[in-house]
Image: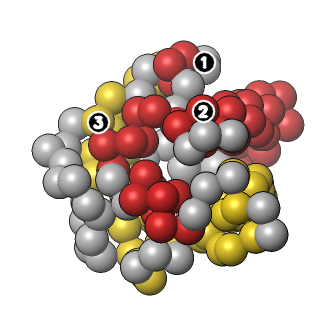
Amino acid sequence: MYKLQAEQTVPASMEKVWDFIKNPNNLNKITPEKMGFEILSDLPEEMYPGMIIEYKISIPFMGKWHWVTELKHLVDGMSFVDEQRFGPYKFWYHYHKIESAANGTRVIDQVYYKLPFGIFGRIAHVLFVKRMLKGIFDFRKQAFAEALGE
């Protein structure tokens, strides 16, 4: 099992940050184009507990993948989890949280994940998956900053 944690502070109110996060249509704005990210579900303007989202994503050396996540443990205005139901990972649990900070709002991501394919998955993690995920979250920092006025 691997863990990735990313944090940033944006100079915006918690309400403004949550308004951005709670709209699942904004996923496209915080995902790098090179991921070939395509939302297949019809999405409402606001997420809700138990919501299922279907996507297609491109993973280097692995092609296009169908990915299904469920939104869980929603605490309005503060946090939620997206958990993989079907997709490229053996296990994916992504906890999203926002909290007040001295100069804005802190955005916190904690991802627990496991790759399939045993030893080959561990090798893939060392060779490119870890770096790919870090790149996605680095992109998110920039995208959040642009969308929320940093």
Residue at 48 percent across and 67 percent down: it is 15
Q: Image quadrant of residue 76? A: bottom left
In this rendered view, identify the residue nearer to me: 80 or 123. Answer: 80
Rendered image: mark on residue 147: none
In this rendering, which labeled residue sits more in front, label 2 or label 3?
2
The crowd level at tag 2 (other Cα within 10 Å; few <14, some 14-19, many 20+) is few
Q: Secondary structure at mark 1?
A: loop
Where's the N terminus, which quadrant? bottom right
Let me know if residue 68 appears in the view. Answer: no
Q: Position of residue 127 (x, y in %)?
A: 83, 29
Q: Position of residue 101 (x, y in %)?
A: 76, 70
The residue carrying pointer 3 sits among few (fewer than 14), some (14 to 19) or many (20 or more) residues within 10 Å by Cα, namely: some
Residue 105 in view: yes
Q: CA distance from mark 2 to mark 1?
A: 30 Å
Of labels 2 and 1, the one closer to you: 2
Residue 11 to residue 15: above or below: above
Find residue 39 and name its label: 3
Residue type indicated by callout 1: Phe
Disc 1: which residue:
61
Q: Secondary structure at mark 2?
A: helix
Disc 2 versus disc 3: distance between alpha carbons? 22 Å
68 horizontally vs 107: left or right: left
Disc 1 to disc 3, how far (Cα)? 21 Å
Q: What kind of residue is marked 3? A: Ile
Reading the image, the residue beneath label 2 is 146
